[in-house]
Amino acid sequence: MDKFSLAGKTTVVTGGLSGLGQAIALSMAEAGANVVLADMREPEDNAALAAIEKLGSKALFVKTDVTKEQQVTDFVDKTVREFGSIDILVTAAGVGNKTPAEDLTEAEWNKVMDTNLKGLFLCCQKAGIKMIAQKSGSIVNISSMSGFMVNKDRTISAYCASKSAVSMLTKNLAVEWAKHNIRVNAIAPGYFVTPFNAVWMDNPQATELALNLTPMKRFGQPHEIGPAAVFLASPAASFITGHTLVIDGGYTCW
Ligand SMILES: NC(=O)c1ccc[n+]([C@@H]2O[C@H](COP(=O)([O-])OP(=O)(O)OC[C@H]3O[C@@H](n4cnc5c(N)ncnc54)[C@H](O)[C@@H]3O)[C@@H](O)[C@H]2O)c1
């Protein structure tokens, strides 16, 4: 099982203070990696960093808005300054939208696209430059099952478009950077219990519909995504690149 080890590696997780990003950060630490959390929010306490350190890894928080190019450059530079390399990037920072397409404002559209697509690209680009120089690296982008299909009874056009683009961008970067020994993959989660979904998971009707549409009849828990991210990032996935791994309890099978 040595191929699943990330011992001695440095991982950066954007959106690492909440939900899936936080769970992935913990799994990365469990696999032995040092972890840098990049998020636009300040941590409320030191629990996230302490949880990583408790696993024997080093942890660092860098306040970063991924939509701002200079801030992305700064967090990547800081990571390399502190840890000597950036071996793994996980791009979990993301936002949703819920306004019907005919009412969607330009500002809402821009927020979703700037965060989920442009911001993700900037992170890949700035980390990729370091990985090209090091001649190795692994990127795991967080896409969504919504990049493959339209969620029933949801009006999330900008979100779906942004996530579809993430999976295609993942393929492009995988092809462009294969010669630099950099693998680029993505994970497409289905419905997971995180603050991201709190707005509708409180509604019994919406919850019942989503559960009925999920063959496994339950939502994913954040801890069920981390091991998949570790796998894709690790040498165990050494011949996998350009792939988007759907983790959705079967939602997209119908
Ligand atoms: N939870 C789900 O069911 C689900 C399903 C499919 C895809 N996803 C995707 O997974 C990712 C993580 O989702 P989550 O459920 O953990 O959400 P979340 O809302 O719990 O966490 C998102 C984190 O991203 C941060 N963030 C938002 N905008 C940012 C920015 N501009 N710069 C830096 N950080 C920023 C937030 O501060 C937050 O900590 C998102 O990309 C989301 O689209 C989630």
Image (cartoon, rainbow, N blue to C red):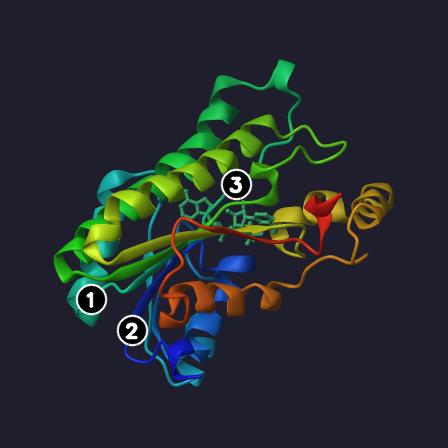
Amino acid found under the numbered disc labelled 1: Ser
Q: Say which quarter of the image contains residue 25.
A: bottom left
Q: CA distance from mark 2 to mark 3?
A: 28 Å
Report which residue position mark 2 lands on.
9
In-image side of 161 versus 192 (left or right): left
Report which residue position mark 3 lands on.
95
Q: Residue at x 44, y 59 (%)?
A: 16
> SS of the residue at dot 3?
loop
Q: CA distance from mark 3 to mark 1?
A: 28 Å
Count of residue discs: 3
In-image side of 180 versus 56 (left or right): left
Of mark 3 and mark 1, the one earlier in the sequence is: 1
Q: Is residue 215 above or below residue 80?
A: above
Amino acid found under the numbered disc labelled 3: Val
Does the beta carbon at disc 2 come under 8 Å from ligand 1?
Answer: no
Tell me, for residue 85, which label it has, or none. Answer: 1
Does the beta carbon at disc 3 come under 8 Å from ligand 1?
Answer: yes
Q: Position of residue 55 (x, y in %)?
A: 44, 84
Q: Position of residue 181 (x, y in %)?
A: 23, 58
